[in-house]
């Protein structure tokens, strides 16, 4: 399943979401502009390597990506779900929320792959937090979705169904990866997704919505 758009309206401009997307794409374009040696050095300096843990790299790794599909997929999910969370939290609080989700996501992955020497990159942990927040705040929003099964089917799916399905895949995949004895094998950081998603659910409730939204009860608001 691949989300195409959501039905939940946003009542403010997603300034921070657009800024985050722009920064991620610009950093990726800079990566592409480097020769192989410089690119490897750049990733080594700013990616998060669990075995050689550095706190600053927890943040810098959130803005690096491993390829076009990686960055475009992440930014597409951020665009669909991020504007509504920014809308209810406000720009400043949303930025803090996003970064905190990314930190929790990265640290969760580090705990489960403490001796890995594989560089961790990507915004997917932070975006998983946005998705977790969206699930609890807009569970009945409809997500226009492309379903790939022999042929492509377009259908509207409740947000809570899609996001729980997505989380279940991450959870089962993460648990399955625990039996992998190849500690240095690269791949998807499933536990970062799990940690980020749970962090998003918790943080959006702890931070609370902006005052002007606290009494709003439209079709999708919960």
Image (cartoon, rainbow, N blue to C red):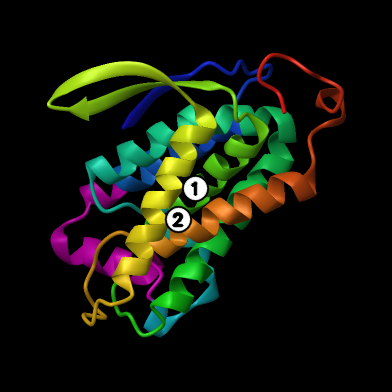
Q: What residue range appears in magenta?
A: 30-49
Q: Is residue 13 above or below residue 81?
A: above
Left or right: 25 as drawn, with respect to 34: right
Left or right: 142 as drawn, with respect to 199: left
* Residue at image location 64% in from the left, 48% down from the top: 201
Query: Badge 1: few (under 14), some or many (20 or more) residues near its Cα, within 10 Å?
Result: many
* Residue at image location 39% in from the left, 54% down from the top: 170
Marks 2 and 1 in Cβ contact (< 8 Å): yes
At mark 2, the secondary structure is helix
Q: Is residue 177 above or below residue 9?
A: below
At mark 1, the secondary structure is helix
The answer for how far apart the CA atoms under marks 2 and 1 are is 6 Å
Label 2 vs 1, first from the N-terminus: 1
Q: Quadrant of residue 87?
A: top right
Q: Is residue 219 visible?
A: yes
Q: Quadrant of residue 15?
A: top right
Q: Is residue 123 visible?
A: no
Query: Badge 2: few (under 14), some or many (20 or more) residues near its Cα, within 10 Å?
Result: many
Q: Is residue 188 magenta?
A: no
Q: Which mark is residue 128?
A: 1
Residue 47 location (% of width, % of height): 38, 66
Q: Which mark is residue 193?
A: 2
* Residue at image location 73% in from the left, 14% down from the top: 218
Residue 43 location (% of width, % of height): 31, 64
Q: Is residue 111 above or below residue 205?
A: below
């Amino acid at each position: 399943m691949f989300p195409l758009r959501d039905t939940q309206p946003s009542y403010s401009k997603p300034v921070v979401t657009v800024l985050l997307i722009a920064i991620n794409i610009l950093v990726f374009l800079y990566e592409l502009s480097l020769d192989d040696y410089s690119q490897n050095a750049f990733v080594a300096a700013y990616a998060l390597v669990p075995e050689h843990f550095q706190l600053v790299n927890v943040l810098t790794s959130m803005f690096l990506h491993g390829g076009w599909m990686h960055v475009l997929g992440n930014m597409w999910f951020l665009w669909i779900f991020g504007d509504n969370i920014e809308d209810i939290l406000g720009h400043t609080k949303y930025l803090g929320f996003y970064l905190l989700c990314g930190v929790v996501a990265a640290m969760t992955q580090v705990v489960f792959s403490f001796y890995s020497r594989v560089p961790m990159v990507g915004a997917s942990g932070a975006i998983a937090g946005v998705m977790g927040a969206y699930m609890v705040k807009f569970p009945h929003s409809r997500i226009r979705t492309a379903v790939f099964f022999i042929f492509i089917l377009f259908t509207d799916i409740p947000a809570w169904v899609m996001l729980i399905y997505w989380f279940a895949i991450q959870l089962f995949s993460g648990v399955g990866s625990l039996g992998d004895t190849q500690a240095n094998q690269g791949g998807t950081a499933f536990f970062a997704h799990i940690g980020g998603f749970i962090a998003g659910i918790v943080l959006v409730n702890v931070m609370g919505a902006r005052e002007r939204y606290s009494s709003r009860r439209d079709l999708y608001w919960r």
